[in-house]
Image: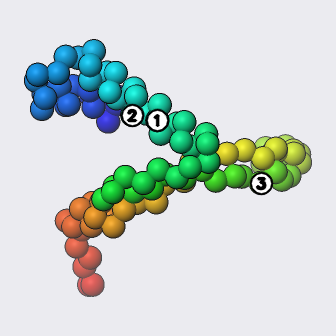
């Protein structure tokens, strides 16, 4: 789902809010998540999951095309751990056949 689609769904559910108000709320929500991750804080949204920042260590990597070794500096990545209830809702319709 795109940001614009999310805003339209919220607008349909809460008709008393204006489009610019909803855009401001969504922007504020994502800015707060970004600021928390920049400050090395975890974000836990109950029944949904947890966002945290992990560090990719610096290392030598290989270019598969040229087989050249390249040094890759340390970088950050976002790690998401799915919540138990979200995991159950996503997988409730999956049935495994033991044929």
| Residue at the image point whose x is 86% and y is 52% from the top | 60
Sequence-wise, which precedes: disc 2 or disc 3? Answer: 2
Question: Quick one: quadrant of the C terminus?
Answer: bottom left
Q: Residues within 10 Å of mark 2 (few under 14, many from 20)?
A: few
Between the C-alphas of marks 1 and 2, the distance is 5 Å
Q: Residue 17: where, in percent of width, then height?
A: 17, 21
- Per the image, the residue denoted by label 3 is 57
Q: Quadrant of residue 38?
A: top right
Q: Residue at x 19, y 16 (%)?
A: 18
Mark 3 or 1: the one toward you: 1
Determine whether label 3 and label 1 are within 8 Å by CB.
no
Which label belongs to residue 32?
1
> How many angstroms separate mark 2 from mark 3 (CA)?
29 Å
For the N terminus, the image quarter is top left
Secondary structure found at label 2:
helix
58 sits left or right of 53 in the view:
right
Between the residue at mark 3 and the residue at mark 1, the CA separation in whole angstroms equals: 26 Å
Q: Are marks 1 and 2 in contact (CB under 8 Å)?
A: yes
Percent position of residue 37, x then y: 56, 43
Which residue in the protein does label 2 denote?
29
The reply, left or right, for residue 63 in relation to residue 90 is right
Indicate which label's residue lies in the foreground, 2 or 3. 2
Q: Quadrant of residue 44?
A: bottom left
């Amino acid at each position: 789902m795109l940001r614009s689609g999310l805003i339209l769904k919220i607008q349909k559910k809460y008709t008393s809010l204006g489009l610019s108000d909803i855009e401001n709320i969504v922007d504020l929500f994502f800015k707060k998540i970004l600021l928390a991750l920049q400050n090395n804080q975890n974000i836990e949204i109950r029944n949904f999951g947890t966002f945290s920042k992990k560090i990719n260590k610096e290392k030598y990597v290989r270019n598969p095309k040229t087989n050249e070794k390249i040094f890759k500096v340390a970088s950050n990545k976002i790690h998401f751990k799915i919540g138990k209830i979200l995991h159950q809702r996503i997988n409730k319709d999956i049935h495994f056949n033991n044929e």
